[in-house]
Amino acid sequence: MSRFFHTLITVALACLVIACAPLQPEREYVQRDDLKVDPEVRHSLSVTELLQSRLEQPGGGSLLQIQFSVEAFEDTDMEWAVTWFDEAGMVVPGVGEGYREVRILRNQVRFFMATAPHERVVSFQLHLREDR
C-alpha cells in the first residue's frame, strides 16, 4: 500500500509542476500587405496596433499619418521604415528616408508615428527588421 501512495504522490507532484510551469504566450503572425516583419525579429516582438488617419493641412489637403505600437517579448534591437505609395502604387520618396534604429526592452510597449511626405500618398508598408 505504501508503494501505491508513493506513486500517487509522485503523479500529483508531476501534475503540479506542469500546471505551475510558466506558459509561453501564443504568438500568431498575421500577414498583412501594409506590414512586413522579418523572421529575425518576429519571434521577439509583436506589432500590437497599426492605425492610419489623414492629417488635415492648413489651406486644404491632408497627409496620411500612421501610428503603431510594438511589444517586445525579449530585449530587441530593431529598425523600422515606412514606404509610401500613391494611388497608382508607385513609391513616393520623402526626405530623410531610411531605417530608424530603436531598442525595445522585454515587456515594454513602444509607440511610433510617421507622416507621409506628400498629399498624394494613399497607402504605405511598414517594415520591421533586425538592427544592422
Image (cartoon, helix red, strand yellow):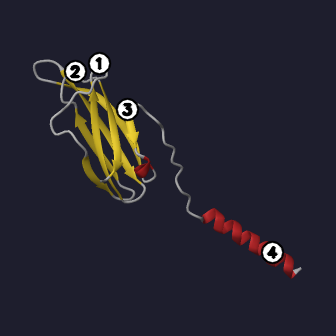
Three-letter residue code for mark 1: Glu
Residue 7, disc: 4
Marks 2,1: beta carbons within 8 A:
yes
Three-letter residue code for mark 2: Arg
How far across and down, in percent of the image, does residue 107 sit? 39, 57
Q: Earlier in the sequence, mark 1 or mark 4?
A: 4
Three-letter residue code for mark 3: Asp
Q: Earlier in the sequence, mark 2 or mark 1?
A: 1
- Residue under pointer 1: 87
Residue 102, disc: none
In this rendering, position of residue 25 left or right of residue 12: left
Q: Earlier in the sequence, mark 4 or mark 3?
A: 4
Q: Earlier in the sequence, mark 3 or mark 1?
A: 3
Q: Earlier in the sequence, mark 2 or mark 3?
A: 3
Residue 34, disc: 3
Name the element at disc 3: loop
Which residue of the protein is positioned furthest toward the bottom in this rendering? 2
- Residue under pointer 2: 120
Q: Earlier in the sequence, mark 4 or mark 2?
A: 4
